[in-house]
Structures are given as C-alpha cells and as structure tokens.
C-alpha cells in the first residue's frame, strides 16, 4: 500500500519469512515497473515473518527498509487498511452465513470454508480504493510531530 493506492496483495495459507520475502520481492518489482525512479520504503513491524525477511530485503533491494518500534500502529498505514479488509470479510461472511454452515457434497468442511474465506478476501480487497489509501497515509503523518515531541498518543 502507498498513498497512490494498493500496489499488490496475495493470499497465502501460511506466512513465514520466505513467503513474506517473496511478497516483498514482488512488490519491489511492481514499484520498479510502475515508477522506475521511485524509491519505496518498506515498513516492517515486529511480526515473526518480517524479522528474517527484513534482512533479506535489505540485502536484495534498492529500496529502503525501516523497522517500526514495538506496538506502533499509529505509524503503520496498513493497519487502517487491515481494519477495512476485516470489516469487508466479516460483512461477506455474515451475508453468506447459510453457505458457511452448509457444506456441499463432495468437499470437506475445511475446503469449503477456505474457499469462502478466499472469496471474502478477494471481494474485500476490491473494496479498497486509492483515495482511502491516501487518507490512511495522511492520517499516519498526523502522529509524527506528537512522537517527535514525546507526547502521549
């Protein structure tokens, strides 16, 4: 995500450092393809998958990698996007409650629910608009001066 919109997203069953590192590589390639003269700044929080991938990203990328301090959602615009994403998924699953509770013949309950979650995720990501990403980015900048002044947030 950037102030210009959602650059890239993917769905993975499990996320570990190698999967996340591949994701960062894909995003980096998209940034270079769309805006070759632009330097991207990747913000990583303390998620376990991010720690090791951060080192690989630093070594392999011409972009900047910045670690966020522990528990600093104010400085991570993706957190607001995740909130909208989760609301979209919950809304979709609420609308499809009967489908969720009824497993079709020939498919396991686990496979059926995974398919519904993937569909919910795809639809939810399609709801994310460029203007919202720009607003998330601007909103996060409002906390910078408070942090520099060591004020409570």
Image (cartoon, rainbow, N blue to C red):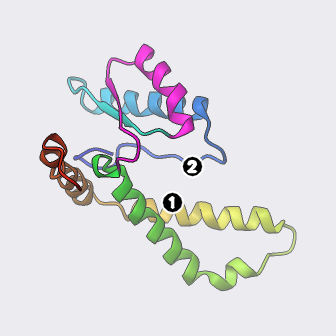
Q: Is residue 131 left or right of residue 98?
A: left
> Magenta stretch: residue 67 in it?
yes
Q: Position of residue 127 (x, y in %)?
A: 38, 65
The image quadrant where one finds the N terminus is top left
Quadrant in the picture for residue 61: top left
Lower position in the chain sequence, tag 1 or tag 2: 2
Residue occupying the point 22% across, 27% down: 38
Q: Is residue 12 above or below residue 55?
A: below
Quarter holding the C terminus is bottom left
Task: Please give the name of the residue rendered at 25% of the width and 24% of the height, measured from the top-left corner.
Answer: 36
Q: Is residue 137 left or right of residue 49?
A: left
Image: magenta residue range: 47-72
Front residue of this view, candidates 118 and 48? 48
Magenta-drawn stretch contains 138: no
Circle 1 SS class: helix
Residue 38, relative to residue 9: is it above or below?
Answer: above
Relative to 7, is 66 above or below? above
Residue assigned mark 2:
11
Residue at the spot of label 1: 122
Q: Are marks 1 and 2 in contact (CB under 8 Å)?
A: yes
Q: Residue at x 52, y 46 (%)?
A: 10
Q: Position of residue 130 (x, y in %)?
A: 25, 55
Mark 2, other Cα within 10 Å: few <14 / some 14–19 / many ≥20? few
């Amino acid at each position: 995500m950037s102030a210009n919109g959602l650059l890239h997203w993917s769905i993975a069953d499990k996320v570990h450092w190698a999967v996340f590192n591949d994701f960062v590589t894909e995003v980096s390639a998209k940034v270079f393809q769309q805006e070759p003269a632009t330097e991207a700044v990747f913000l990583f929080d303390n998620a376990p998958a991010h720690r090791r991938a951060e080192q690989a990203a630093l070594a392999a990328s011409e972009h900047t990698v910045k670690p966020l301090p522990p528990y600093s959602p104010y400085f991570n615009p993706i957190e607001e996007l995740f909130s909208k994403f989760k609301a979209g998924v919950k809304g979709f699953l609420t609308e499809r409650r009967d489908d969720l509770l009824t497993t079709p013949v020939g498919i396991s309950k686990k496979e059926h629910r995974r398919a519904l979650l993937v569909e919910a995720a795809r639809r939810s990501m399609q709801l994310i608009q460029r203007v919202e990403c720009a607003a998330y980015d601007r909103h996060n900048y409002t906390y910078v001066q408070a942090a520099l002044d060591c004020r409570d947030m």
